[in-house]
């Protein structure tokens, strides 16, 4: 793989070292071009090519389904992870006394949809993480006969811990427990296979590792459990005869499209499709290898400087995120880095780096050169 050619796709690389893809990613050139092309088309031709736009939306749906190992009719477009998980949380037929099990280090997108069920008598049980790691045994220990669903992030946003989805999914299938995944911190960085890992529901929007715009992502609902989720938001496009406007036949679409209640965010879908094309072009296995290799270089450099790496370095637990505790004030380091052309996240006393496949050794060197100046000054 010619990584330098891939780097040319990212104009942001000309102005500094962007190492913050776990937050909001810069757009590749092809995504910018797709947005411009669609906007120009809509501006100059109106809806003359509307049917082509709709056909392209379906191509993007297939592209997302292929990325996660799903069937195309198991995928719906959503505006973000929170919406996708809320569709699931609000759509299931809960009974008083049911419970949901989640780790206690989840991003709020994977917390509040479940806490919102308390009004129905559903308990949310938190699994206590151990130094940023979520142990399978601790998840299993929180499960009882009333556990209806387990929901985890594929990668925990703060520590970068990579959950063992295959093991959790197999446990859920054995126990007849539903399995939901917030995949926003792994899609685009690590391979995903919803069938292999027995995932029932998955949600992620595209503005992090998937290198697309905010406000558009994907929801996966396994055909195995589709009929167990009632759409809580419905509209003209939720039904089988959506284009027959005066035929009020409230028969829901057969697949996950039933969760798409109205008109598409077609501009953002064009952006999303352009971004997804990168991952199919390069290949997720190569991308994972590249990202973990950059992470290895970061970890080695931090350890050389005797800085505490808080992300797990154990086999199978690594992700694209490397989190560490700096000497001195983390927020001050974050501001110093930004002033010197290095973009990362400083939060909660930690610094988080998240390089993508187009980053290179020069970016890592720039980070460490800047870090050394900060540490020396401190």
Image (tube, rainbow, N blue to C red):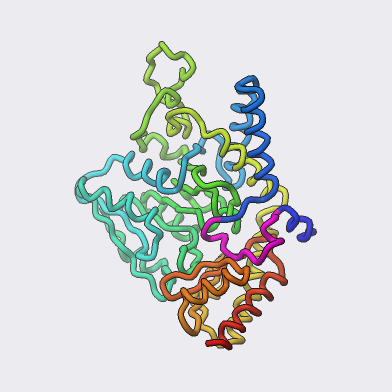
Residue in the image at 63% along x and 45% along y: 276
Residue in the image at 45% along x and 32% along y: 260
**Percent position (x, y) of residue 342?**
61, 69
Please tell me whether residue 210 is drawn above or below residue 310 in the rendered image: above
Please tell me whether residue 202 is drawn above or below residue 233 in the rendered image: below
Q: Is residue 128 magenta?
A: no
Q: Nearer the viewer, residue 327 or 306?
A: 327
Q: Is residue 19 magenta?
A: yes
The quarter of the picture where residue 365 lies is: bottom right
**Region in magenta:** 10-24
Q: In this rendering, does residue 195 appear at all? A: no
**Percent position (x, y) of residue 210?**
59, 51
How many numbered tags mark residues here? 0
Left or right: residue 31 versus residue 114 is right
Q: In this rendering, does residue 297 appear at all? A: yes
**Percent position (x, y) of residue 215?**
49, 44
């Amino acid at each position: 793989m010619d990584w330098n050619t891939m780097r040319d796709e990212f104009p942001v690389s000309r102005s500094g070292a962007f190492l913050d893809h776990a937050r909001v990613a810069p757009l590749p050139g092809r995504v910018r071009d797709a947005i411009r092309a669609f906007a120009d088309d809509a501006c100059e031709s109106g809806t003359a090519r509307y049917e082509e736009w709709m056909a392209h939306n379906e191509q993007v749906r297939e592209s997302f389904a292929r990325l996660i190992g799903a069937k195309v009719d198991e995928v719906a477009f959503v505006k973000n992870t929170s919406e996708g998980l809320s569709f699931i949380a609000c759509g299931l037929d809960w009974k008083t006394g049911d419970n949901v099990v989640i780790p206690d280090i989840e991003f709020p997108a994977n917390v509040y949809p479940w806490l919102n069920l308390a009004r129905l008598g559903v308990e949310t049980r938190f699994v206590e993480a151990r130094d940023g790691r979520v142990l399978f045994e601790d998840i299993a220990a929180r499960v009882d006969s009333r556990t209806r669903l387990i929901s985890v992030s594929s990668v925990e946003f703060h520590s970068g811990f990579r959950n063992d989805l295959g093991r959790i999914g197999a446990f859920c299938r054995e126990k007849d427990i539903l399995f939901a995944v917030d995949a926003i911190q792994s899609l685009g960085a690590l391979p995903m296979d919803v069938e292999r890992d027995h995932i029932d529901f998955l949600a992620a929007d595209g503005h992090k590792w998937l290198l697309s715009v905010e406000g558009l992502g994907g929801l996966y609902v396994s055909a195995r459990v589709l009929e167990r989720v009632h759409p809580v938001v419905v509209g003209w496009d939720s039904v089988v005869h959506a284009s027959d406007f005066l035929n009020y036949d409230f028969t829901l679409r057969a697949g996950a499209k039933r969760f798409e209640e109205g008109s598409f965010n077609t501009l953002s879908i064009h952006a999303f499709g352009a971004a997804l094309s990168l991952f199919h072009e390069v290949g997720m296995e190569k991308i994972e290898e590249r990202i973990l290799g950059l992470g290895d270089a970061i970890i080695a450099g931090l350890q050389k400087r005797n800085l505490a790496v808080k992300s797990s370095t154990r086999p199978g637990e690594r992700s694209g995120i490397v989190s560490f505790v700096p000497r001195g004030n983390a927020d001050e380091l974050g501001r110093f880095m930004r002033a010197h052309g290095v973009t990362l996240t400083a939060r909660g006393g930690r610094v988080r780096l998240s390089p993508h496949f187009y980053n290179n050794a020069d970016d890592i060197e720039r980070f460490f050169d800047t870090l050394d100046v900060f540490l020396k000054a401190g």
